[in-house]
């Protein structure tokens, strides 16, 4: 049986001894603490020389980067402890660096872009510079608290480059300044440092905590600071896991592989590998260690303190006022508009269009049945559709790119475009190319939601015969048929109904769309027209998906009694006054989606838990971890409509209660519309027969 001894400068109370098997060989592993006594450690080294097959030295702080005097201090320790020793000796630094990188890359790949744009707080960037190097490939949102903990200076470092400058130059100068002693003796300054560290922890998604002085770094951290966080730390002993569990931590990523039954430090594992391979310490290379990690499947240790896997993905979504009347939601604007001429509101509308983006609301509490969670931000740009159309598309692009940069800084991993921002210019193509974060317009789920709602409304009205597996015998019309959402609605309606009428302004585009649909779905009857009123009185279902900016595009007075109209346009094509003219027609406002979990956000004009389908698409992609450009441009792939629909069902998305301009339709409301429609049809038949 081979012998591994770990001589640690740490506490003797943590000593252990056990037997294990590794690479087909039997080992006895013993840890001997010295309570910081270098002389005792030197004596133990001499005592175990030639008796042990490999010796690990623990308790030496492994600065990944730092000033000469700190590194020299560690070199002197090693030189003294390693004098006259023939047995291979290691501090585990090679394995530590390899496992740092392997761990992060494995997690990033296995869990799907886990660290993308994450807000990462390093309590010591100098201790974990290897992690800093790897993490910088996934996120720019890194903050380092080294000046606070090393020198008592109330200042964070905000970039990898500045950390290097601090570690190699500034830190060496600061050793001669009694800043740390001074800050620890001045209560207000120490309290301030504790306060700003707490605030930084609260803002972070991921916190990297050193192994050395673990409890000192987190002594003031509570549930408020650590609740819901991901903690990265080397060699997370059971007492540390319990400590983090009590403070609500979601995930602990231990960068030290757990290849034995118990958690041991890197120096022990590296000594074990050296002895197993029968090599000297200088004969073990990083490639050898990485190969062993791979072949032995030493996956990083991921611990969920609560016992359940948890992951919170992050998104952002852009909203804007749909008209100048929406600006009155601000109390100050509403108050002043009552005492000023109409020109005041016009002026406010113009001015606010130039405002930089700002956060309207934080969104929390979204939880999928799969266990995935999402949180995000609603970001407002000030332009109304009128103002966006009054300017060149670059005017809106600029503000959307500002919103994208803001989203990335806050940690969002994908950003959605809402309402008119997804229509301006080339419908998101330019923004997606220039933004440093994936963009989606939400149009795939908008199309899916619209037809989902229409199908549900038709079923509940009961005026058309619906048989499973067969096309519905009925006539449907799509206004704005060649648009992004409209074209997909046409394709999907062609699979469900035997007749589809497509309305648009460009006959050539309509004919091209018709030919394309007939190739996909032969046997359906398709007619095209540029006049929406030509066939309206015969339609059973109408989807209005125009970008008419609030102009009247549909004369509802000509609609067939019992017709189901789904208004996907934003702003709506049909005003409350229009809808009131026809109580025998069911007008629904597209297909809103009910979110899973218990979401919390500011009012967006919909009931609790209900959001527009375009916002729901961004949330579904976040829950799925699909941080990609999903839907942009004016041509939507119906395969993506189907895909986002299935993803939505997987994550617990539901079609919200059907709503109209006056709120949610109850079953009684729908039956009332149905009865009025039947009465109107009888009157029409009587008039014809008479």
Image: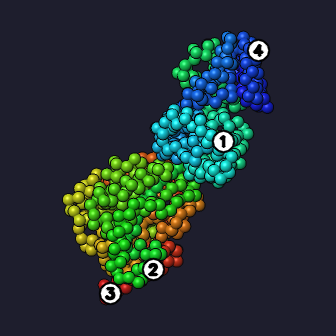
Q: Disc 2 marks which residue? A: 335
Question: Mark 1 falls on what kind of element?
Answer: helix
Disc 3 crowd rating (10 Å Cα; few below 14, some 14-19, many 20+) is few
565 relative position to 93: left or right: left
Disc ID at residue 687: 3
Q: CA distance from mark 3 to mark 2?
A: 53 Å
Quick one: which residue is furthest to the right in this view? 13
**Can the viewer see residue 645 in this picture?**
no
Comes first in the chain, label 3 or label 1 = 1
The mark that comes first in sequence, 4 or 1, is: 4
Q: Nearer the viewer, mark 3 or mark 1?
A: 1
Could you tell me if the residues under marks 2 and 4 are in contact, i.e. CB atoms within 8 Å? Answer: no
Lower position in the chain sequence, tag 3 or tag 2: 2
Q: Tag 3, which secondary structure?
A: helix
Which of label 4 and label 1 is nearer to you?
A: 1
Could you tell me residue 146's position as x and y percent? Answer: 57, 40
Q: What SS does tag 4 mark?
A: helix
Badge 2 or badge 4: first in the primary sequence: 4
| Residue 292 is at least partly visible in this image | yes
Side (left or right) of 618 relative to 518: right
In which quadrant of the rendered view does residue 104 lie? top right
Q: Residues within 10 Å of mark 1 (few under 14, many from 20)?
A: few
- Closer to the camera: disc 4 or disc 3? 4
Residue occupying image coordinates x 44% and y 78%: 334
Q: Residue furthest bottom?
A: 690
Q: Which residue is at 72% across, 43% downward?
A: 242
Q: Specify the label residue 181 is tagged with.
A: 1
584 with respect to 292 (left or right): left
- The residue carrying mark 4 is 47
* Circle 2 crowding by C-alpha within 10 Å: few under 14, some 14–19, many from 20: few
Residue 125: name its quadrant: top right
Q: CA distance from mark 2 to mark 4?
A: 85 Å
């Amino acid at each position: 049986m081979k012998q591994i001894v770990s001589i640690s400068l740490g506490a003797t109370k943590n000593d252990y001894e056990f037997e294990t098997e590794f690479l087909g060989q039997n080992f006895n592993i013993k840890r001997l603490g010295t309570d910081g006594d270098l002389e005792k450690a030197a004596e133990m080294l001499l005592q175990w020389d030639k008796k042990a097959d490999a010796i690990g030295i623990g308790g030496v702080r492994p600065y990944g980067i730092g000033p000469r005097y700190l590194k020299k201090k560690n070199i002197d320790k090693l030189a003294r402890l390693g004098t006259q020793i023939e047995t291979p000796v290691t501090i585990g630094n090679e394995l530590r660096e390899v496992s740092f990188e392997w761990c992060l890359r494995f997690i990033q790949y296995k869990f799907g872009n886990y660290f993308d744009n994450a807000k990462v707080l390093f309590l010591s960037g100098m201790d974990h510079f290897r992690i800093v190097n790897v993490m910088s490939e996934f996120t720019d949102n890194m903050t380092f608290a080294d000046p606070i903990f090393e020198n008592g200076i109330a200042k964070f470092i905000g970039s990898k480059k500045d950390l290097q400058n601090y570690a190699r130059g500034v830190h060496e100068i600061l050793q001669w300044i009694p800043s740390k002693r001074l800050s620890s003796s001045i209560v207000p300054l120490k309290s301030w440092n504790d306060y700003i560290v707490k605030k930084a922890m609260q803002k972070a998604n991921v916190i990297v905590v050193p192994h050395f002085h673990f409890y000192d770094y987190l002594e003031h951290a509570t549930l408020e600071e650590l609740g819901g966080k991901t903690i990265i730390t080397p060699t997370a002993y059971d007492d540390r896991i319990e400590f983090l569990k009590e403070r609500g931590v979601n995930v602990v990523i231990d960068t030290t592989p757990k290849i034995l039954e118990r958690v041991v430090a890197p120096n022990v594992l590296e000594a074990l590998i050296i002895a197993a391979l029968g090599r000297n310490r200088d004969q073990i290379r990083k490639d050898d260690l990485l190969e062993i990690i791979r072949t032995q499947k030493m996956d990083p240790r991921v611990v969920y303190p609560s016992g359940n896997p948890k992951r919170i993905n992050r998104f952002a979504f852009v909203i804007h006022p749909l008209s100048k009347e929406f600006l009155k939601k601000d109390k100050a604007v509403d108050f002043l508009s009552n005492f000023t001429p109409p020109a005041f509101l016009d002026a406010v509308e113009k001015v606010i269009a130039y405002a930089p983006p700002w956060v309207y609301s934080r969104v929390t509490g979204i939880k999928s049945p799969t266990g995935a969670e999402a949180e995000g931000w609603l970001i407002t740009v000030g332009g109304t559709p009128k103002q966006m159309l009054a300017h060149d598309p670059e005017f809106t692009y600029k503000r959307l790119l500002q919103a994208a940069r803001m989203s990335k800084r806050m940690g969002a991993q994908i950003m959605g475009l809402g309402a008119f921002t997804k229509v301006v210019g080339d419908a998101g193509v330019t923004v997606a190319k220039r933004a440093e974060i994936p963009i989606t317009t939400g149009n795939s789920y908008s199309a899916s939601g619209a037809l989902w709602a229409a199908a549900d409304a038709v079923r509940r009205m009961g005026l058309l015969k619906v048989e499973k597996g067969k096309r519905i015998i009925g006539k449907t019309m799509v206004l704005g048929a060649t648009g992004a959402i409209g074209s997909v609605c046409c394709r999907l309606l062609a699979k469900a109904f035997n007749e589809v009428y497509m309305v648009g302004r460009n006959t050539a585009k309509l004919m091209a769309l018709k030919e394309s649909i007939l190739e996909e779905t032969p046997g359906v009857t398709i007619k095209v027209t540029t006049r929406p009123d030509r066939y309206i009185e015969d339609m059973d279902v109408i989807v209005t998906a125009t970008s008419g900016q609030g102009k009247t595009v549909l004369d509802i007075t000509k609609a067939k009694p019992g017709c189901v109209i789904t208004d996907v346009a934003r702003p709506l094509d049909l005003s409350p006054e229009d809808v009131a003219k026809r109580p025998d027609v069911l007008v629904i406002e597209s297909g809103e989606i009910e979110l899973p979990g218990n979401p919390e956000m500011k009012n967006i004009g919909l009931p609790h838990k209900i959001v527009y389908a375009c916002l729901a698409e961004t949330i579904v992609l976040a829950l799925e971890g699909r941080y990609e450009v999903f839907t942009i441009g004016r041509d939507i792939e119906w395969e993506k409509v189907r895909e986002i629909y299935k993803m939505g069902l997987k994550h617990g998305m539901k079609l919200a209660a059907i709503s109209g301009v006056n709120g949610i339709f109850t079953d009684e409301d729908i039956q009332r519309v149905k009865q009025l429609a039947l009465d109107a049809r009888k009157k029409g038949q009587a008039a014809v027969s008479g």
